[in-house]
């Protein structure tokens, strides 16, 4: 776009306004970024966004190059080095925003107990929402992928699907998360006697009566919890039930109500849960993805996603 002198003057003033906004809210954990990239994103993020969205017109060859509208040959060496660094930093931000932005927004809505639960699953030394995503990424890489770029949350779900041999065609994240929880509950139930199932079902119904205000009939609970269309409080029960078996296999205790009640019930009904839990996790090599952390994390996240979805935002507060 060719601008006259007056237009250029107006655009320069607009550029100054956006450049003055130098504390860009990345809505992602800071630790995902190199310190130099983080400084660039925070200082120029609002300006980069305005350029990309067309709220500002590019005025220099470097700005045109940043937007992919100019060849590098028309830019001075000094400006080219600077703009390349800007492009790399902003490119990283956009990738991580696409890959992890939704989950980070969920974590920002979580209460202290929920962040503590995820932190315990991931065996974090400090309890902070800022540590959850970096730890999920770290535990989702095998030895050969250690130096690769960060995987996305979708990549993690795909690895779990392959590991568990899940035959699900859906690409909806919430449905994949639920299918992982259902897989573990079905495996656990397949190892229980009919008498044990009846006792376990009664415990779930009791929790529903106390917490959910719903009515489940005897003999229908497990069919309901393993249904693909499960939603609302049912997802809470599904996640709690699956985690009560899984954590017994990995020696973990979590701090939320339904889980505490169900894991206690399991220990009474079937004794030590190791004989069930051991069947839920296959043996993993030392250099493999740490599924014992990422699978229970994903199952718990399935409940958090359900709880903080727009449909349920007023139902579980």
Image (tube, rainbow, N blue to C red):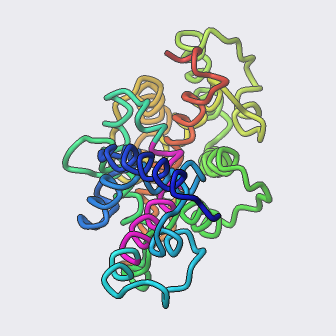
Query: Which quarter of the rendered picture does the N terminus lie within?
Result: bottom right
Closest to the observer: 65 or 112?
Answer: 65
* Residue 140 position by quadrant: bottom left
Does 98 lie within the magenta span?
yes
Position of 61 relative to 266 (above/below): below
Instruction: Please tell me which residue is depicted at 39% across the width and 82% down the height of the picture.
Output: 80
Q: Which residues are magenta?
A: 84-104
Answer left or right for 167 relative to 235. Answer: right
Position of 75 relative to 298 (above/below): below
Residue 58 seen anywhere in this rendered image of the structure: yes
- Residue farthest to the left? 125
Q: Position of residue 315 (x, y in %)?
A: 59, 15
Task: Tally the marks.
Answer: 0
Closest to the observer: 114 or 223?
Answer: 114
Closest to the observer: 203 or 208?
Answer: 208
- Residue farthest to the front? 5
Instruction: Please tell me which residue is depicted at 76% across the width and 34% down the height of the picture.
Output: 223
Instruction: Please tell me which residue is depicted at 53% across the width and 13% down the height of the picture.
Output: 211
Q: Position of residue 114 (x, y in %)?
A: 38, 32
Q: Position of residue 83 (x, y in %)?
A: 39, 74
């Amino acid at each position: 776009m060719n601008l006259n002198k007056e237009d250029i003057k107006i655009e320069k003033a607009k550029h100054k306004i956006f450049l003055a906004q130098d504390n860009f809210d990345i809505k992602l954990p800071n630790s995902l970024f190199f310190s130099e990239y983080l400084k660039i994103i925070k200082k120029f993020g609002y300006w980069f966004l305005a350029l990309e969205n067309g709220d500002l017109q590019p005025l220099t060859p470097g700005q045109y190059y940043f937007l992919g509208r100019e060849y590098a040959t028309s830019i001075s060496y000094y400006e080219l080095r600077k703009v390349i660094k800007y492009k790399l930093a902003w490119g990283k931000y956009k990738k991580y925003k696409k890959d992890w932005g939704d989950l980070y927004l969920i974590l920002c809505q979580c209460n202290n107990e929920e962040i503590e639960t995820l932190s315990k699953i991931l065996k974090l030394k400090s309890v902070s929402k800022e540590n959850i995503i970096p730890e999920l990424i770290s535990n989702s890489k095998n030895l050969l992928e250690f130096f690769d770029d960060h995987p996305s949350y979708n990549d993690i779900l795909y690895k779990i699907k392959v590991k568990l041999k899940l035959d699900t065609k859906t690409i909806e994240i919430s449905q994949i998360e639920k299918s992982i929880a259902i897989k573990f509950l079905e495996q656990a139930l397949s190892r229980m006697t009919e008498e044990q199932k009846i006792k376990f079902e009664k415990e779930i119904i009791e929790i529903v009566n106390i917490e959910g205000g719903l009515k489940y009939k005897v003999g229908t609970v497990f069919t309901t919890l393993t249904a693909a269309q499960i939603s609302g409080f049912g997802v809470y029960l599904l996640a709690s039930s699956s985690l009560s078996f899984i954590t017994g296999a990995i020696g973990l205790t979590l701090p939320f109500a339904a889980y505490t009640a169900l894991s206690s019930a399991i220990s009474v009904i079937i004794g030590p849960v190791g004989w069930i839990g051991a069947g839920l996790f296959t043996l993993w090599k030392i250099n493999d993805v740490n599924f014992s952390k990422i699978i229970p994390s994903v199952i718990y996240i399935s409940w958090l996603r359900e709880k903080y979805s727009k449909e349920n935002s007023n139902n579980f507060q």
